[in-house]
């Protein structure tokens, strides 16, 4: 099996002597990368070590003080546990739907498979903001489909924007947006599974399901690991959907609904830049650790 | 007889998948149908049926003229951010991916590790520090604040890297060198053509990322004259709430439809390219 994510191999004949000239091509990217990724990271870390002084003005060095504050912050944990719950439920549902769609389209048993592939991918081309505005209207009780349904049933049965349902409603939007994208990643990987492996399984008497489980699924493990990592990162970064829906459900979606919203509101509503940077760094570290753990686990199972 | 690779088509499977298709399409159908309604019809008629008047063209006209034609300005801004931001991202990712794939130099592995690490860093977590940094540099509320961060696409760099390793034989580069071509000339005259499917894929995904970008312009810009479509549409939507509420739902909906159309067309027409580019990327994953 091929490895999950690793440096692509370089031909042995690559020219070492001319190697240094490679920097001509890499340098422009590296400079902008340093300005937009590394500098803000370093700056954020610097910020996180200081705190505003309430009475005297200016800032004072507090070492890791902000970090101990964050780890004891009920709002932060509330937000963190919410995205963790979201991740635990939404990501498996979305990836499973994407897998089923990819297998169905790849199975050659589907009528008009190309049409299905294109339409299922379509939501990816819809800007996230438009997707949320659209679903927000649909969820709304002014003139949305939820209102139509309640009207039809004669009671307020469907309340997508209520406290009990809001996380599910957000999960539905994210699923709608990204099933197609993940489906395409899986489908691209399925297309390069060698046909002779599939024929060999059929000669051994394996049915469609058995072929999927023992030949195709292992063959696209790398793609599944990559899609899982991206989905986990996406869940931890959850921002657009709740932030835009907040105008429809201001009492249900708090300013610390997700860690990212918390960091954003600390900065832009509360002017607490130092603490906001701390929250961002803590989330970044947690995300990186979990993404790394998933990748390690994905690789270990391959052997 | 049907073979394993060409089995009989299944109606049951097609029917099940058709249900999923409905889930994908109904919200979009709702959006398109709603774009043909006047605001009063929008509030009084059921979502999936047409209103009393077919007001699509009237709505489009109003969308472009409302508030002194600010929508057109937002469209122009989005195009500016897409052309310079996504275009620049494609150029930088292509050059760097190629350089990393075909040259061996000190620090190559380090660059790879840092870029992969960057994919795992939450982009939105970087946004607040980037905002603070850019405000020190005086870039806030200028197009540059949106464009500069858009120039980096770690995913694009990775895709070109895996693509270039196989798409450009070392022998081809050697032959060009014997002909006396310099490294930059080799890149421009020999390799760009080989990389074309990969470049189209990277460009398309960079265009989508920039066109759809919301969080970055939201925090970097406060002057509505620099807003892209996404931030502008949400501002129109937010206008319906509060004391001086002026709901323009029909414009938000029509504007949304107009925002989607260019991307859908781009994806449909470039299908052949980006699907082969993605497939090449996934072989290596």
Image (tube, coloured by chain):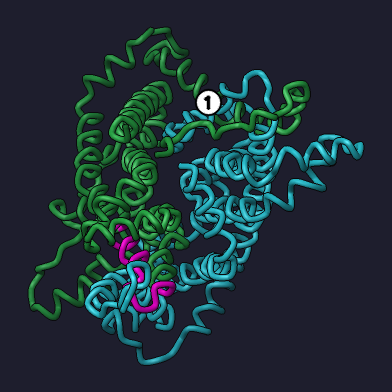
Chain colours: A green, B cyan
- Pointer 1 indicates a residue of which chain? B
Examine the image and state in which quarter residue A98 appears. bottom left
Tell which of B2 and A102 is nearer to you: B2
User: As drawn, which residue projects farthest toward the front?
Assistant: A203
Judge left or right: residue B84 versus residue A269: right
Q: Which residues are magenta?
A: A98-115
Residue A31 percent coordinates (x, y): 67, 28
What residue does disc 1 label?
Answer: B114
Tell which of B216 and A126 is nearer to you: A126
Tell me the quadrant of the picture where the N terminus of chain B can be found: bottom left
Residue B8, compared with residue B153, is above or below; it is below
Tell which of B58 and A159 is nearer to you: A159
Residue B273, compared with residue B179, is above or below; it is below
Residue B277 percent coordinates (x, y): 56, 54
Magenta-colored stretch includes residue A102: yes
Q: Please name the predominant secondary structure of the magenta segment in the image.
A: helix
Q: Looking at the image, which residue is at 54% across and 41% down?
A: B220
Residue A53 percent coordinates (x, y): 39, 13
Magenta-colored stretch includes residue B270: no
Q: Looking at the image, which residue is at 30% across and 50% down?
A: A217
Tell which of B226 and A289 is nearer to you: A289
């Amino acid at each position: 099996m091929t490895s999950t994510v690793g440096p692509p191999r370089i031909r042995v004949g690559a020219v070492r002597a001319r190697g240094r000239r490679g920097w001509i091509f890499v340098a422009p990217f590296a400079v902008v990368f340093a300005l937009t990724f590394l500098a803000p990271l370093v700056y954020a870390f610097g910020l996180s070590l200081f705190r505003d002084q309430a009475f005297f003005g200016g800032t004072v060095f507090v070492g890791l003080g902000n970090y101990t504050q964050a780890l004891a912050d009920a709002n932060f944990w509330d937000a963190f546990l919410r995205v963790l719950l979201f991740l635990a439920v939404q990501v498996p549902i979305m990836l499973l739907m994407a897998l089923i769609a990819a297998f169905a389209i790849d199975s050659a048993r589907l009528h008009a498979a190309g049409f299905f592939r294109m339409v299922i991918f379509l939501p990816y081309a819809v800007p996230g903001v438009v997707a949320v505005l659209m679903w927000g209207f649909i969820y709304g009780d002014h003139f949305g489909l939820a209102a139509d349904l309640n009207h039809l049933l004669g009671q307020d049965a469907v309340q997508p924007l209520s406290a009990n349902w809001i996380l599910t409603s957000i999960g539905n939007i994210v699923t709608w947006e990204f099933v197609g994208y993940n489906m395409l990643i899986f489908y691209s990987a399925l297309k390069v599974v060698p046909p002779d492996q599939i024929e060999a399984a059929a000669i051994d008497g394996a049915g469609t399901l058995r072929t999927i489980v023992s030949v195709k699924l292992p063959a696209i493990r790398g793609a599944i690991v990559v899609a899982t990592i991206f989905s986990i990162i996406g869940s931890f970064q959850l921002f657009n959907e709740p932030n835009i829906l907040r105008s429809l459900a201001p009492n249900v979606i708090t300013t610390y609904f997700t860690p990212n919203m918390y960091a954003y509101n600390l900065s832009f509503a509360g002017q607490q830049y130092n603490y906001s940077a701390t929250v961002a760094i803590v989330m970044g570290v947690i995300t990186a650790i979990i993404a790394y753990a998933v990748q390690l686990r994905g690789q270990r199972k391959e052997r | 007889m049907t073979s394993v690779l060409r089995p009989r088509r299944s109606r049951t499977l097609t029917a099940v998948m058709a249900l999923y298709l409905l889930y994908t399409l109904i919200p979009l159908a709702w959006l398109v149908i709603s774009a043909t309604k006047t605001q009063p019809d929008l509030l009084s008629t059921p979502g999936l049926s047409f209103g009393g008047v077919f007001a699509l063209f009237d709505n489009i006209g109003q969308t472009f003229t409302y508030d002194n034609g600010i929508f057109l300005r937002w469209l122009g801004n989005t195009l500016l951010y897409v052309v310079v931001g996504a275009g620049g991202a494609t150029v930088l990712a292509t050059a760097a991916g190629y350089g990393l794939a075909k040259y061996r130099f000190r620090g190559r592995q380090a660059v790879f590790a840092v870029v992969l690490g960057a994919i795992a860093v939450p982009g939105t977590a970087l946004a607040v520090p980037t905002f603070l940094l850019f405000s020190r540099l005086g870039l806030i509320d200028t197009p540059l604040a949106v464009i500069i961060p858009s120039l980096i696409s770690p995913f694009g760099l990775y895709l070109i890297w895996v693509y270039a390793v196989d798409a450009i034989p070392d022998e081809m580069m050697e032959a060009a060198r014997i002909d006396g071509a310099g490294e930059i000339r080799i890149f421009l005259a020999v390799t760009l053509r080989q990389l074309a499917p990969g470049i189209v894929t990277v460009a398309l995904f960079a265009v989508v990322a920039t066109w759809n970008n919301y969080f970055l312009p939201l925090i970097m810009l406060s002057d509505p004259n620099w807003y892209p479509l996404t931030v502008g549409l949400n501002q129109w939507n937010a206008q319906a709430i509060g004391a001086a509420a002026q709901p323009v739902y029909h414009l938000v909906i029509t504007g949304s439809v107009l925002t989607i159309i260019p991307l859908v067309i781009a994806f449909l027409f470039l299908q052949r390219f980006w699907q082969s580019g993605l497939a090449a990327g996934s072989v290596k994953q």
